[in-house]
Image (cartoon, coloured by chain):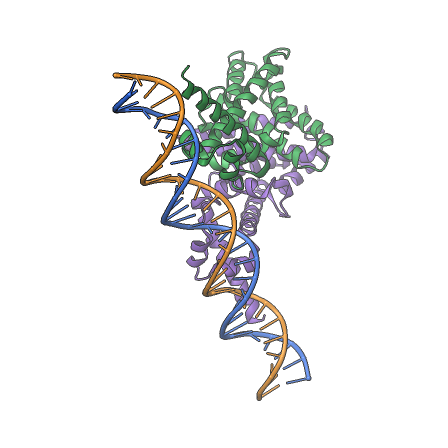
Chain colours: A purple, B green, C orange, D blue
Amino acid sequence: MAKRLETMEENRNKLIAAARKAFAEKGFAAASMDELTADVGLTRGALYHNFGDKRGLLAAVVDQIDHEMALRAKEIGAQADGDWQGLLAEGEAYIKMALDPEVQRIVLLDGPAVLGDPSKWPSQNSCLAGTRQTVSKLLEQEVVKPVDAEAAARLISGAALNAALWVAASDKPADVLPKAIEAFRAMASGLLAKT
Amino acid sequence: MAKRLETMEENRNKLIAAARKAFAEKGFAAASMDELTADVGLTRGALYHNFGDKRGLLAAVVDQIDHEMALRAKEIGAQADGDWQGLLAEGEAYIKMALDPEVQRIVLLDGPAVLGDPSKWPSQNSCLAGTRQTVSKLLEQEVVKPVDAEAAARLISGAALNAALWVAASDKPADVLPKAIEAFRAMASGLLAKT
DNA sequence: CAAATTCACATACGTTTCGTATTTGAAATA
DNA sequence: TATTTCAAATACGAAACGTATGTGAATTTG
């Protein structure tokens, strides 16, 4: 590979890594691009060349984290006993992952506010896409009621991620986490077709 | 009432009204406080005197909208046939109200990102508080499974509002709204105790 | 192999915006 | 009428973003 492209790739990754840290710690609005770039030995020139603007950098960061979350959720869901348990396990995984301040601040709070609704994000392996796949499978198997797959996926992941926000904001996260998971499983069971 | 306090109250309301408009149209970050205040014949001096800072103004706006939403949801819920149908009606009402760009932008997107999790908002008659009340009533009646009231309320309202974001972001909101409502009702039914 | 060109990034600059510190002037009060 | 209060205005300083331009090493071309 040409040396120029090689170092550019490195710099892109350095910037994304620094942005993950800065956005998570200070929030999107308060994160200074001057500081951020200086931290990795670059200037804003590199940033605007690679990502267009500040939002572009956030989009790249969100995409990366979303990708990681989707992969992890899929792994966990695959280990469950059957597709239905897999869906529940995925949701539970989202709740737990969303306790990470980085996920919370960047993906759940600043992401939608700055980039718009997640359904419009480009990620192929996004959380939403993964959940929709699982729901579709369950629809074919007639395990769940005949509802819209997209809507169900959105409700599942939305409920899970929202529950996580609540858990994290509470005074004793460790205490309320099981309550959130219990309520989540209860509510999700409403999608089950009568057996 | 003393004239000074009277006009101050008027100015506060004018600023809040202007902020609702500006925040809804441009988003919190892009809304200029100079423009906003000039629109109602004031300067930023009035703003910083009354609300402390930009966040303070957003908090006041969010509080007002949240209050209006909770009242409306309660009204609609009260007309339903029984408390359980009332809960579903409330959720449906949230979905519909959240289609309003003002609610969406200010309460669902910028609100949590700038002010933190809704569970920490001061509103007494907030959406969350209203839903928690209804859930608590249903818990006493043993209509719903014995889950944590707070968690259930959060899941219900979270799912509803999240569904609304999805509906609004879709290409044909009118088409997907009924699907969202159907899926919401299905999922919520998971909270029902076996009869 | 030397000249030309590309391009990733740096630098310099202007604009906008927020928050504070200070001042003003009309209403309330004594 | 003199004094005090206080809601709002004004002036100021400190970022921060985005653009326009410069630069030098890597690549390409003749």
Q: Position of residue B15 (x, y in %)?
A: 50, 29
**Closer to the camera in the image, C23 or B76:** C23
Residue B182 in view of the camera: yes
- The residue that appears at 69% across and 35% down in the rendered structure is A149
**In the picture shown, does residue B148 fall above or below A150?**
above
- The residue that appears at 66% across and 39% down in the rendered structure is A132
Q: Position of residue A52 (x, y in %)?
A: 57, 55
- The residue that appears at 65% across and 23% down in the rendered structure is B185
Q: Position of residue B153 (x, y in %)?
A: 53, 23
**In the picture shown, does residue C12 fall above or below A123?**
below
Snapshot quadrant of residue A111: top right
**Total numbered labels:** 0
**Closer to the camera in the image, B103 or B30:** B30
**Closer to the camera in the image, A11 or B108:** B108
Q: Quadrant of the C terminus of chain B?
A: top right
**In the picture shown, does residue C14 fall above or below B1?**
below
Residue B146 in view of the camera: no
- The residue that appears at 68% across and 23% down in the rendered structure is A194
Q: Quadrant of the N terminus of chain B?
A: top left
Q: Is residue B8 left or right of residue A145?
A: left
Snapshot quadrant of residue A94: top right
Q: Position of residue B170 (x, y in %)?
A: 68, 37
